[in-house]
Image (tube, rainbow, N blue to C red):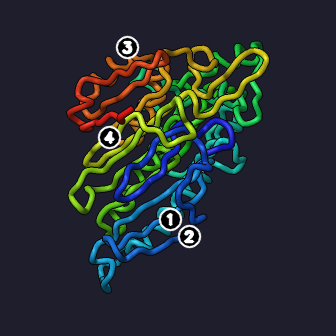
Amino acid sequence: MNRRALVLGAFSIAATGAASLLTGCHSGEVSRLFGGSAQQDTIDYNLVRGSTFAFDTYCEFTIYGGADNHAEHTSGKATAQEALTLLISECERYTALLDPYSETSDIARINAAHGAPTTVDPDTIAALTCGLEYSERFDGLFDITIGAVSMLWDFKEGIRPTDEARTNALPHVNWRNVHIDEETATVTLTDPEAKIDLGGIAKGFVADRLCQTLREQTIIEAAVISLGGNIAYFESKPDHDSWTTGIRDPAHPGGTELVGTIHTDGGSVVTSGLYERTFTDSAGTWWHILDPKTGMPVQTDLVCDTVICESSALADALSTTLFVAGSQRGQEIVCAIPDAEAYFILEDGTHAASEHWQQRTSFSKARK
């Protein structure tokens, strides 16, 4: 979503007939890049694959067109090839709305208004409403007004804020300062110095919206949507097998070593890791997941977590929340959400999981 603070999910390679691999944000790991173009494969299930660059990461799509996409149709809905074009277009549109570093985006205009009501797109309202719901639900462990602090950090250039700047910004991190008027489609920051950053939920929210678009506007059979590591599986796999997602070993974030493989019928899989974006200076090593209470990189016993649930937005928000909470409290949070399960890799090398993780995922550990 931006060049600094928005890519909070893990990067993935969405593949058919093999595991989607969740790892850190290493764009050089992409197996197939088409730069927004599409490639047709009519051998298996009328596959269409393509990619684009959005949300400051590579986004990949694998679409199972099905038999109907080979024949002429009169439904008026998009075929597999048209669906790919639609997904790419939607990614570009949501990026233009939600990127806080683009001066013309809705989020940037809200932040620059210093408390004045700002008219925005209805989809921006929906994204903010979703973010506020999870900010309240997770009691500020997740907070969409983290922008007051996160925008002081630059993990690409290796810049951290002074203690004074960070301390001065912290009082403006409070999701309750975001007021939405749906009738007038306006957003007001009741604290003029507050700033919104949807980095912890934007890709998940968009992944859910893309699945909704496929359901309403296309005749495709199934799809894999990979937005820089936020993986959403649209419908069941046509061969009636499970979707498989490999979790890369955080000890080798740039490699292909797996911790294990998840098997699911659908839904979303999101992984976050401290190794994703870091920089080191004379004071130490700093990572991109910030604690809303301190404005500093979160102090946690986790190295990475993987969340699965039906909603990609919820999985996205949870993957960040659990880092702030830590493994013990994180398991309690997940257990209170019937639809969600999580897997934790701790900094001491041990692993932990929520109560029904194994039953839900048929998780198979990699052989060492």
Three-letter code for the amino acid on which mark 3 is drawn: Gln
Helix, strand or loop at label 3? It is helix
Relative to 318, 34 lies left or right? right
Say which label, 1 or 2, has the lower sequence index: 2
Instruction: Please name whichever residue, 233 or 91, is drawn nearer the observer in this view of the structure.
Output: 233
Asked if the residue under mark 2 is in contact with the one under mark 4, i.e. CB atoms within 8 Å, the reply is no
Q: Mark 1 and mark 2 in contact? Answer it, CB < 8 Å.
A: yes
Residue count near mark 4 (Cα–Cα under 10 Å), binned few <14, some 14–19, many ≥20: many
Q: Which residue is mark 3?
A: 328
| Location of residue 159 by image quarter | top right
Dot 3 alpha-carbon crowd within 10 angstroms: few under 14, some 14 to 19, many 20 or more: some
- Camera-nearest residue between 3 and 358: 358
Q: Secondary structure at mark 4?
A: strand
Q: Residue at x 63, y 21 (%)?
A: 172
Q: Position of residue 176 (x, y in %)?
A: 51, 24
* Mark 2 crowd level (few <14, some 14–19, many ≥20, 10 Å Cα): few
Q: Is residue 130 visible?
A: no
Q: Which residue is mark 4?
A: 262
Q: What residue would you read off at disc 1? A: 50
**Secondary structure state at the residue bearing disc 1:** strand
Residue under pointer 2? 37
Please state which of the two labelled residues, at mark 3 or mark 4, is closer to the viewer. 4
Q: Earlier in the sequence, mark 4 or mark 1?
A: 1
Identify the residue shown where x is 54% and y is 34%: 252
Left or right: 226, with 42 as reference point: right
